[in-house]
């Protein structure tokens, strides 16, 4: 396939999705085995990692990641607005609010974003990955009302997926149309984009705001450094006796050791505990 002079070297959409799914699935398996969070929380956390693997291409105006991202944001925020004011307005007014929010974000915000962004610019940088992670923690903690540890675990998945995308764009010399290309390296994986100082400053400000709005990361780091969590992970790493119940292995543990308990709810709950209401008089 002939190289294109106009396209930057990048991995295609399918490659990013496949790599993001593989990495996020691997991390999800470790997280589930370590019994860190409840299994029902693991699905949205894993999806955050897959989303991160395509998010840097949001600045491609006609790319599938960009269209899907703004469509998803439009659906999410339109229903968030609808449910937040459902008891205040009539059905007709609710329809107008829902539809107006949907159109405003899907088409209005989409156009504004692409008029102010450049592909392989600020969004292809580590500072953007940090912003995406912090914004994920804000959404999980403040919008979805998840526990702070769960919120920052989702942020970690988002960050890993985002960075995997940047690495693939450096390693693979494939443009968006799947044509082999190898012009230069260094444009995808970078800390900040010095070519666009104002955009970089805006991203840094957005990162600071997201960190300020996000829940405390202390529960996440406390859980990550827990000896019990690493002991559980080590205990679940290999089968005790047989692979898939077929191939018998030499016993690696004492026969008197009690069997490992099944994963139940995880050490991080669904949401932050609410204070008890005072007794009525």
Image: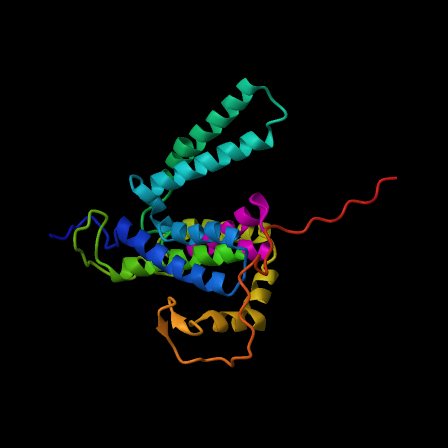
Q: Is residue 132 magenta?
A: yes
Q: Quadrant of the C terminus?
A: top right
**What residue lies at 55% left-to-right and 79% top-to-bottom?**
256
Which quarter of the picture shows residue 162?
bottom left
Q: Position of residue 22 (x, y in %)?
A: 35, 58
Determine if residue 138 is in view.
Answer: yes
The stretch of residues the image draws in magenta is 128-151
Name of the residue lying farthest toward the right: 281
Name of the residue lying farthest toward the left: 2
Determine if residue 226 is in view.
Answer: no
Side (left or right) of 56 relative to 43: left
From this view, report whether residue 177 is shown above or below residue 72.
below
Q: Position of residue 37 (x, y in %)?
A: 54, 58
From this view, report whether residue 187 is shown above or below residue 70.
below
Q: Position of residue 237 (x, y in %)?
A: 44, 71
Nearer to the camera, 130 or 205: 130
**What residue lies at 39% left-to-right and 52% top-to-bottom?**
50
């Amino acid at each position: 396939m002939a190289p294109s002079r106009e396209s930057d070297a990048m991995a295609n959409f399918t490659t990013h999705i496949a790599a993001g799914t593989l990495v996020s699935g691997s991390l999800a398996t470790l997280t589930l085995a370590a019994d860190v969070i409840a299994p029902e929380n693991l699905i949205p956390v894993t999806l955050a990692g897959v989303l991160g693997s395509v998010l840097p291409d949001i600045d491609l105006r006609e790319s599938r990641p960009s269209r899907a991202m703004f469509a998803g944001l439009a659906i999410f925020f339109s229903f968030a607005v609808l449910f937040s004011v459902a008891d205040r307005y009539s059905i007709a007014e609710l329809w107008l609010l829902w539809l107006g929010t949907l159109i405003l974000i899907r088409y209005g915000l989409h156009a504004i974003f692409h008029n102010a962004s450049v592909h392989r610019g600020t969004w292809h940088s580590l500072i953007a990955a940090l912003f995406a992670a912090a914004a994920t923690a804000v959404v999980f903690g403040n919008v979805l009302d998840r526990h702070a540890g769960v919120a920052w675990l989702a942020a970690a998945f988002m960050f890993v997926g985002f960075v995997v995308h940047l690495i693939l764009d450096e390693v693979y010399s494939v443009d968006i149309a799947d044509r082999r290309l190898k012009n230069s390296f260094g444009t995808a994986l970078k800390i900040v984009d010095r070519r666009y100082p104002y955009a970089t400053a805006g991203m840094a400000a957005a990162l600071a705001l997201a960190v300020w709005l996000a829940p405390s990361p202390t529960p996440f780091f406390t859980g990550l450094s827990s000896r019990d969590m690493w002991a559980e992970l080590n205990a679940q790493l290999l089968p005790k006796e047989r692979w898939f119940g077929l191939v018998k292995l030499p016993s690696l543990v004492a026969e008197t050791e009690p069997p490992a308990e099944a994963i139940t709810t995880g050490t991080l709950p669904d949401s932050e505990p609410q204070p008890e209401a005072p007794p009525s008089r």
